[in-house]
Amino acid sequence: MSRPSSPESPSMKRAADIAAVAVLLQIGAELGADQVLDAGQAFDAAELARVTGLPQHGMAEYLTALSAAGLVAETGAPGEYRPADDYAQRRYEAGYVSWSMSANYPFVEHARAFLTDPAAAAKAHHRDGRRVAVSSKWVGERDFYPGVFEHVNASGARKVTDLGAGAGGLLIKLLRQDPERHGVALDLSGAACAAAREASVAAGVEERLEVVERPIESLIEDRSPVEGAEAIQACFVMHDVVEDDAVFQGVLGACRDGLAPGGFMAVCDAVRYAPDETERRFSALFTYLHANFMDIRLPTEAAWLEKFETAGFSSVKCLPQPMPGARLFIATK
Amino acid sequence: MSRPSSPESPSMKRAADIAAVAVLLQIGAELGADQVLDAGQAFDAAELARVTGLPQHGMAEYLTALSAAGLVAETGAPGEYRPADDYAQRRYEAGYVSWSMSANYPFVEHARAFLTDPAAAAKAHHRDGRRVAVSSKWVGERDFYPGVFEHVNASGARKVTDLGAGAGGLLIKLLRQDPERHGVALDLSGAACAAAREASVAAGVEERLEVVERPIESLIEDRSPVEGAEAIQACFVMHDVVEDDAVFQGVLGACRDGLAPGGFMAVCDAVRYAPDETERRFSALFTYLHANFMDIRLPTEAAWLEKFETAGFSSVKCLPQPMPGARLFIATK
């Protein structure tokens, strides 16, 4: 039976498609099936059951749903599937929904509490770190990591420090590009640091990667993690310390002082309420959630530039990134 | 500063737009601001504060975000806004994200528990009725209510029973079309029945609306709510009793027997895994969530048709609806 003619164009059903794919893939991430899907190889329900530790019947049902949705395709071997050709594109789109609604769900669900008593609500309702990290990665792999990667890689920097390195994915990718490159991964999360160490061993770059479990504010007292760096990169972490201008200037100053001559910071972060038509909606959500649920007031683009200039960098460039509201600031010593 | 050229077309940023709008509007529904926005009139932060019982400062911040996102526009009077011209379209798209991710979040968040011990998980983790109702309304106002409304209204039916009537919106709209039309709103939720009574008074149709708080299975023992009806309508409620074929046939038989001569059922419901390219993604999510998290195995289109035929209806038509996977079955006595 064919679909009815409708006043709506096919593109107007995109909301249903995007929403459905996001929830199917988010469920996959909750089950632990995402690592199998992301590997891009053929697999079956038995392998999903083994990796996730869940009943094979349930994984077969999940595979039926993924197949019906066109997210996986049959290989021809009985019960065997592989990710569909557009899986990466679908996962990327899903990332925006998963970050916006799922990673931030404690804020959505308890919105009244946050507007009534923000301090008490912030203590009671926390985001889940893995949900934030996974959805950020789905978006970032297309919309903000490439900008930082390409700039730092093209610079030829041999000593790179990543502030808020998380599981170290971006830095390890840079180390694999150049066997002479060394990295320092700084993160305040012990779990993230452990993941970065593990990933560096898996990538065979563990001898060129130092992992430092510290908050970025600690650079004010001890700037050794950035000392002599030719590039210091930071993706959506500098806004965590932007609220107190003295602290922020202290961190920027330590980075500037620590950088090797001619070195630079590559800071990817978000601006406050970007007005452009292509950016305004997601930027509004990002700005609003940070200000009202995370106590972080994002600077405007001009205010970000001024902060780098005040810290004594000799030149600062601002490069818009594909993620709405995101900018890559290149601040040269 | 202009946006960078990018390999992606503007439409590929739709995922970010749709996700952001959905979360902003879902937060509005959590705060209770949705009723003010939906009214379509001019309003300010003070009115939002009064209606929601939340601090005016917080509502002003929320309005700033809605304005930055283009969901509301300034009227020209200081601090006064009205919904943007495309608010209804944006809310409709948001409905798919809100239903998929927010209304179903207990399933997403506890997916491992549902796959490990479905019965225990179903007891422990419930969807929030208002989140389900609000997001279903946002979708349904464009994608499935109009089909039922137009068919029942055009039939000229004077006695209409709505099974699973919820807050009575669809039935009350039908009563307002014809002063000779009478309705019976049946729902198992006491809160929904109370809302339907209240809405009927607000619409001035309370003397023509009978509200009956009962499950639809009860029609097998007592079919008085459908006795003499010229139309019986049911939106996404018949699948609740589809699992036990004897019960389902009992309900359909009671409806057929109760209908006036020439009367009909208008049942809008979902089919199992619709394969069409425009339907497959959302239909996959809908089918999978019902089977694995709500213990409801949706029939195929052919199986739905067979059930009506088995129940002795003289003719059954199937009309695809704009919501992916949705069908309107018209079964005539």
Image (cartoon, coloured by chain):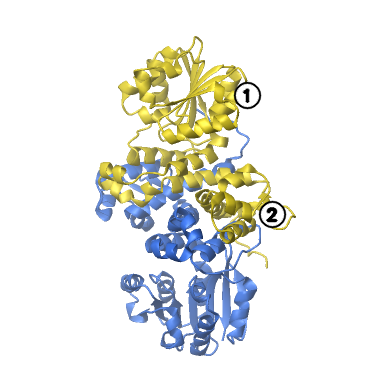
Chain colours: A yellow, B blue
Asked whether, in this view, residue B223 is left or right of residue A207, the answer is left
> Quick one: quadrant of the C terminus of chain B?
bottom right
In the picture of the structure, the residue carrying the numbered disc 1 is A177
Number of residues whose C-alpha sits closer than 10 Å to that of mark 2, classed few (under 14), some (14–19) or many (20 or more): some
Question: Along the line of sight, which residue is nearer the eye, B185 or A79?
Answer: A79
- The amino acid marked with disc number 2 is Glu
Percent of width and height locating residue A52: 55, 51
Q: How many marks?
A: 2
The residue where tag 2 is placed is A80
Residue at point 67%, 49% (across, down): A82
Mark 2 vs mark 1, CA separation in Å: 34 Å
Q: Residue A238: x and y, percent?
A: 41, 27
As helix, strand or loop, the secondary structure at mark 1 comes to: helix
> Foreground residue, B117 or B89?
B117
Q: Secondary structure at mark 2?
A: strand
User: Counting other residues with Cα less than 10 Å from the Cα at mark 1, is it few (<14), some (14-19), or many (20 or more)?
Assistant: few
Read off the chain for label 2: A
Mark 2 / mark 1, whichever is N-terminal: 2
